[in-house]
Amino acid sequence: MLRNAVKMLTRNLGLKLLALLFAVTMWMAVVNLDDPTRSKTFTIAVTIENGEAVTAMNKYYEIEADAANVTFNVKGKRSYVDEMSSSDFRAVADMSKLIQKENENVVPVEITALRHSSQLTISKRTRELKVTLEDLMRQAFMVQPNPQGEPADGYALGSLAVEPNRLWVSGPKEVVSQIDSVKAAIDVSNMSTDISDSVVPVLYDEEGEAVDTTRLTLSLDIVTVKANIVSKKTVPVKVNYSGKPAEGFEVISVNADPKEVTIKGRSEILNSISAVTIPEGVISVEDADEKFEQKVDINQYLPDGAALENSVEATVTVTIDVEQLERRVFTIPVRNIRVDGLPERYKLDFNERNAEIEIYGLTDDLDKLTTGALRPVLDVSGLTPGRHVKELQLALDNKYIVGETVISFTISSENSEDTENGGQDSSQGNGESGGSEDNEENPDDETGADGEEENPDANQRETDGQTVPTGGSAAEPDTGTESEE
């Protein structure tokens, strides 16, 4: 049986082998006609991995835009190739495999199929990607608040805060080195209450132009800016000083520039502030003999809780005008002195014909001053009969300094006994006879120094030949005389 089977298999063996070969060939032909081999082109983006390897070298890498994608050809059975898409492939550039050449830097790009990889053939599976290397710079910047606009009337911008306020920037040294400041803007236009906003920080160079952040890496994308809105108030600057100028000199004026400043703070604090005062110990005029200036920082004289709206106004220039004074003596007839406070039962006799009044001031001011403008007043309120010496009171502007103005006079009672005693005291104190003898010696005194006849009114009394006003407005004064020293 076995022999018969072997004999049947080996009979016509060549024909049988030829038939088998033909069958296989036919099968392969049918298969190829139904699922032929084909190729297809794909373009995908290159994925960068291990970029920190370059950063560790203190370098910044950059891939040219036209090299960011890779195009390749895939070959395989139509049944596999047709169902593949770009997402089925991956191109990876591993920066840890960076090769630094003399003229260029390259990194290999490995292209792989995510499925059917054994059934596909990828042309140029490994590529080279050119990489540009630059020095890397990493720097931290404080984010500064940048208010825009003005608050509502009567309000000012108080404190500003940014959270977080520290921004790290990394990138090419040539770009990072251009950064001068980082600011976060907030609009406070017409605001009367506190506000906050989330904003994107902006990088600026020294010229105030925005820096392009395309090649930079920022540690923050958004920050929160808070603005405090407070009240404001404009107050004058008052200046005090200490010391005395040199002898014969006087402080003529004290001026501050600016004369007033605007302060800001909570309304309850501002309500208690009427001025910003520079204390006496700051400026001294001791022995000064000329005009001088002194700059003062007034920030230290603001109360707690108050601040200047404009920091430029912090430095105030104080000008002290010190000038030499001229001395002049004005002679005024005693009849032109108004007497106040003399009781009806008393009378007053001046022991001198004229009063010598010493005035100090600037030459231009003294030239404009007349004796008629002095209007001297003698207040004898509370004085008893007898001889007295007292200063006259003058109505002058504060630009004049009054020196010696004393005058001697005698008060006596209209009672004969008191009059006798008063006249005796006057004679003894003066060392000369009474006013009647003076009139005998100088009869012209009854008609005044200028020779014109007097017409005393009801409020005047004749005292030893001199008309003494006893109250009300002063009589029209004589021109008098003046002398200079």
Image (cartoon, rainbow, N blue to C red):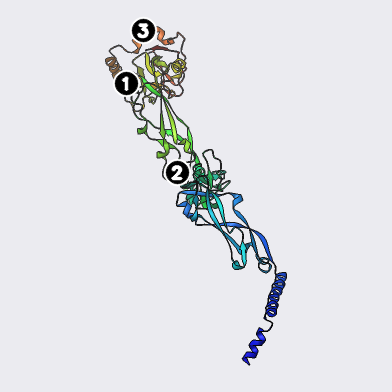
Q: Mark 1 points at which residue?
A: 389
Q: Position of residue 453 (x, y in %)?
A: 46, 10
The alpha-carbon separation of the residues under discs 1 and 2 comes to 54 Å
Residue situated in front as seen by the camera: 70 or 6: 6
Q: Where is residue 414 in the image (x, y as percent from the top left)?
A: 35, 21
Compare marks 1 and 3 and give the one earlier in the sequence: 1
Compare marks 2 and 3 and give the one earlier in the sequence: 2
Q: Which mark is residue 362?
A: none
Residue drawn 67% across the image and 61% down it:
40
The alpha-carbon separation of the residues under discs 2 and 3 comes to 75 Å
The alpha-carbon separation of the residues under discs 1 and 3 comes to 25 Å
Pointers 2 and 3 in contact (C-beta within 8 Å): no
Up-down relation of residue 114 to residue 356 (above or below): below
Pointers 1 and 3 in contact (C-beta within 8 Å): no
Q: Mark 3 points at which residue?
A: 440
Which mark's residue is nearer the viewer, 2 or 3? 2
Compare marks 1 and 2 and give the one earlier in the sequence: 2
User: Could one spot residue 279 in this view of the protein?
Assistant: yes
Q: Which amino acid does label 3 sit on?
A: Glu
Residue situated in front as seen by the camera: 466 or 11: 11
Residue neighbourhood size for the residue with mark 2, other residues' Cα within 10 Å, grouped as few (<14), some (14–19), many (≥20): many
SS at mark 2?
A: strand
Q: What residue type is labelled 2?
A: Ala
Q: Position of residue 169 (x, y in %)?
A: 49, 49
Up-down relation of residue 365 to residue 90 (above or below): above
Residue neighbourhood size for the residue with mark 3, other residues' Cα within 10 Å, grouped as few (<14), some (14–19), many (≥20): few
Instruction: Identify the image quadrant of the N terminus.
Output: bottom right
